[in-house]
Amino acid sequence: MNLRNLFFVVNRLCFSKKNRGIVHIISLISLIGIAVGSLALLVVLSVFNGFTSVAETMMEKENPPILIQTIEGEKFQLDSVINKLQKDKSQKDNLTLVPIVEQTAMVSMGTAQSIVKLIGTNDEYFKYNALDTLLINNNSTFKHLDKDICILGVGLAFELGLGQGAEKMGIPLKITIPQTDNQEATVLEDMLQSCIVTFAGCFQSNSQLDEGYIFIHIDKARELLGYKNNEVTALYDIPKPNTNKQKYIQKRKAALKGIENIEAKNLLEQQSLYFRIVKSEKFAVYVILSFILFIATINILSSLIILYIQKQRMNYILRALGTTKRDLQRIYFYYGMTINIVGCILGIVLGLIICFLQQKFGLIKLAGENFVVDAFPVRIMFGDIIRIILIVIIIGTLTIRIVTNRLKIK
């Protein structure tokens, strides 16, 4: 039997008005089950992608597109690295190179103390991460990082007791770090190095920067740590907007290959643990919801078996007309796959509609007020749609094929 005749028989089985009965009710339930499973898989993955995108956006405030540092994370000479990068052809796509001196420190004001991440940088930093535009106080007078001032996150300012208007009082903050090069010190004070900076304002970026970061001028940080004028612990490489970041990162890594002990990391490599966890969680979502799709497919098997029992007379007639056992098995197989595929397409279409509505209108809100976003974020990825279709087809093909091959056709 050719494919045209096979699909004619399948069409009659699926859509003929005379064939309405318990089989078609079970088949409709199976179709709805596949549709709901596909819809749920698409919606859950899209919301998962949405939250991941929000998290990545927040990470981009804390981490540069490209982080250049030594393999051991120690200080290095800035000049040789910058010369290499500026001579490379990819420099035309560079927005700025930001020198960074980073160190764990203790900041104190009176009796209030906190362990923080000290960032020494210059005004180029604000081209990449516009913290100067996020100041919730002193935003009218702050122009740039002077050598003797600091800005910090709103959470850290609150922890130190720096309230509204504190930036106008010239309040001094003490920054203390361990003095690692003084091995012979026996008194605690000799093991520590301190400096005084003036509080100039605080910012709110809705990221980890708000909680434990303090920014001072890079010259002040070098002076505190005993670094030379061209020494840094990291260099932020920032591409221009609308630059193909993937190609840019590859070119910058290639440009640095000649420098020993220096590496360049993209955002994925900087936060490798986070992205591995995200991939694992997404895989778990696929597995759990794929199991639900498998349960829905079992209903199709039930309708196939009942249909086979109900259509014994049709089987005999088709066999008498010369239809082979293989062709009859194919008829029942295509019948099951029709339900499977139609349910999948229906579920994906409905899922896309729900996702678009959520993106446009934010129909389902997040409970609470202290969130970065008001409604559940949604990000539809074409790759997820393809994977859902493949999962439905693979599960359906395997289970339906096993059942149809076991039908006892005489």
Image: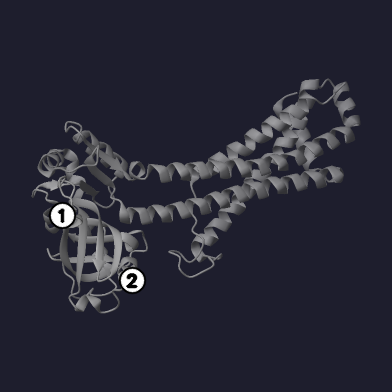
Horizontal and vertical percent for residue 120? Answer: 19, 56
398 above or below 173?
above
Q: Quadrant of the C terminus?
A: top right
Is residue 109 left or right of 303 when viewed as pictured?
left
Q: Please, what is the three-letter code of the amino acid marked with disc 1?
A: Asp
View extreme (right): residue: 313
Give the crowd class for mark 2: few <14, some 14-19, many >=20 residues within 10 Å: few
Identified at 84% across, 42% down, the residue is 23
95 above or below 317?
below
Identified at 18% across, 61% down, the residue is 216
Marking on residue 190: 1
Horizontal and vertical percent for residue 231? Answer: 12, 46
Q: Quadrant of the N terminus?
A: top right
Real-space Cα separation, disc 2 to disc 1, in angstroms: 30 Å
Q: Nearer the viewer, residue 121 or 391?
A: 121
318 above or below 197?
above
Give the structural element (helix, strand or loop) at label 1: helix
Horizontal and vertical percent for residue 67? Answer: 26, 45
Q: Nearer the viewer, mark 2 or mark 1?
A: 1
Residue that numbered label 2 is attached to: 158
Horizontal and vertical percent for residue 290? Answer: 63, 41
Badge 2 or badge 1: first in the primary sequence: 2
Q: Please, what is the three-letter code of the amino acid marked with disc 2?
A: Phe
Q: Is residue 175 visible?
A: yes
